[in-house]
Image: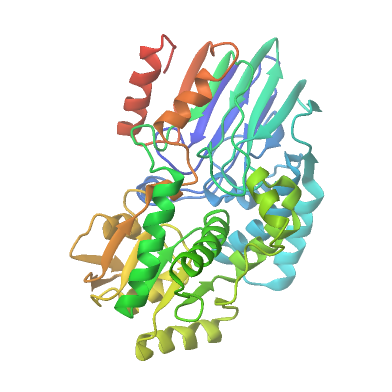
């Protein structure tokens, strides 16, 4: 049995791992695109490894750095199934369609045909149940707590158990169930995005978000939140709803009528609808909230932006009016999407705030802004940064160092060997040291 990395091992994006069995058959876990510095090191998105013997494709979740190269995998000749959780099966066609529009074609007929093909390849499975897969192996998926449908993948093959963590979520996040540690693993492939950092706790991050929302109102500016369409956006909407209610209750001050919340992402709106359809996968807190609020992701002052003309008119209105607003738009690392236009128009204003709630990869515009540089390159042009910049680490969908340590030590039997992936070198080194202090074998 051999573990071969085709991405996500030396960097933080492009996750793609091949488990090659002694019988000559292989299982492929994830197939994502590269971003930031990783993309410069891997400019060609075409599949550059042989697919001979690849019997099975397993998807941990649908973020593009784990699923974005699926069109290239299929174009390279992969014809097997795609095993994933049931929520992931609902979300994946939208992600594939978006990836096709960005990287391949905007021809509606071709996109529809390709998405139909992907849907036919889907093999959704229930959490917690062992399932036989091609390659003389069986798999079990358990919740990873990262985004809706995310999964830790356990693989039994050739008398060994190999576990792929995928992206592990932070504990006590709203909506999603906490990640579950596997019972055991002969080999654990563990993400390490925040292996050197600790996040703020839930109450602290709520307080900081509330402060920024109130500051937006007082400053009569625009707060721009670059956020991934899936996961982060829904979590922000959920907690903004709680904040609006809390501010009204304790201060008598209504933010609902004073500041607009704008979600400028058609894809995010579609994902939010799916989140609302799949409340059976929400955690206990979300289930309790649903008992008295049947739409916790929707509130009075929320506006969703659809087509491009509406986006342009909204951008123009905000730039001219001086009306306070909070804009959530993709992409999360500011590498493209509609958030770029808001940054171009508003970054040079002192009453603009930019709030980062997720990881910013090296070499991305988001990282440059987060590092508070004097300017940022957007589409080949320099834009001065006079806006105030904030970061709330507690909203990360990734586990922090302590969460990752708890994930490992929560196993009934210590893993035989751990391979760290999906992290910058500093993060991997820090996490490796902590794990080795606990007597674990890490490489």
- Find the residue positioned furthest to the left: 374
Is 29 on the left-hand or right-hand side of 196?
right
Q: Is residue 358 visible?
A: no
Q: Which coloring applies here? A: rainbow
Q: Which percent across, then down, holds residue 197?
A: 34, 36
Q: Nearer the viewer, residue 19 or 202?
A: 202
Q: Nearer the viewer, residue 81 or 86?
A: 86
In the image, residue 188 sits, relative to residue 264, either above or below, namely: above
Kindly identify the residue that appears in the image at 33 percent across and 60 percent down: 365
Count of marks, rendered view: 0
* Residue 259 figure quarter: bottom left
Taking the spot 43% from the left edge, 63% from the top edge, the residue there is 226
> Horizontal and vertical percent for residue 114?
73, 59
Figure quadrant of the N terminus: top right
What residue sits 33% from the left and 78% below the top? 221
**Residue 108 picture location, percent across and down:** 70, 72
| 433 left or right, relative to 74 | left
């Amino acid at each position: 049995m051999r573990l071969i990395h085709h991405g996500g091992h030396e960097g933080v994006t492009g996750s793609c791992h091949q488990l090659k069995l002694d019988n000559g058959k292989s299982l492929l876990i994830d197939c994502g695109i590269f971003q930031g510095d990783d993309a410069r090191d891997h400019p060609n998105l075409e599949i550059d490894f042989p697919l001979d013997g690849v019997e099975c494709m397993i998807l941990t979740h649908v973020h593009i750095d784990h699923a974005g190269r699926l069109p290239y995998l299929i174009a390279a000749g992969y014809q097997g199934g795609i095993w994933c959780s049931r929520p992931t099966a609902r979300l994946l066609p939208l992600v594939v369609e978006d990836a096709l529009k960005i990287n391949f074609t905007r021809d509606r007929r071709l996109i529809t045909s390709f998405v139909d093909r992907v849907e036919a390849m889907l093999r959704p499975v229930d959490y917690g149940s062992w399932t036989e897969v091609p390659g003389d192996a069986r798999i079990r998926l358990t919740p990873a707590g990262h985004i809706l449908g995310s999964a830790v993948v356990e693989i039994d093959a050739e008398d060994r158990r190999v576990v792929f963590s995928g992206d592990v979520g932070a504990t006590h996040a709203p909506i999603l169930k906490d990640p579950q540690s596997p019972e055991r693993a002969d080999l654990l492939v563990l993400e390490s995005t925040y292996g050197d950092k600790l996040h703020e706790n839930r109450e602290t991050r709520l307080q900081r978000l509330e402060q920024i929302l109130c500051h937006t109102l007082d400053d009569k500016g625009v707060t721009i939140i670059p956020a991934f369409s899936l996961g982060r956006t829904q979590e922000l909407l959920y907690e903004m709803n709680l904040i609006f209610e809390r501010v009204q209750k304790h201060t008598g001050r209504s933010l609902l009528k004073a500041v607009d919340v704008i979600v400028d992402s058609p894809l995010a709106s579609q994902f939010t609808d799916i989140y609302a359809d799949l409340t059976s996968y929400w955690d206990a807190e979300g289930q309790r909230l649903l008992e008295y609020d049947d739409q916790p992701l929707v509130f009075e002052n929320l506006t969703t932006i659809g087509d491009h003309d509406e986006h342009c008119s909204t951008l123009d209105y905000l730039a001219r009016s001086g009306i306070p607003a909070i804009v959530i738009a993709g992409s999360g690392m500011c590498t493209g999407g509609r958030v770029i236009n808001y940054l171009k128009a508003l970054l040079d204003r002192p009453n603009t705030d930019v709030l980062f709630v997720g990881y910013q990869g090296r070499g991305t515009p988001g990282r440059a802004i987060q590092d508070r540089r004097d300017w940022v390159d957007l589409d080949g042009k320099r834009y001065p940064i006079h806006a105030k910049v904030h970061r709330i680490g507690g909203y990360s969908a990734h586990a922090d160092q302590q969460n990752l340590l708890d994930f490992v030590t929560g196993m009934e039997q210590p893993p035989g060997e751990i391979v760290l992936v999906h992290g910058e070198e500093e993060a991997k080194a820090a996490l490796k040291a902590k794990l080795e202090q606990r007597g674990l074998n890490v490489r």
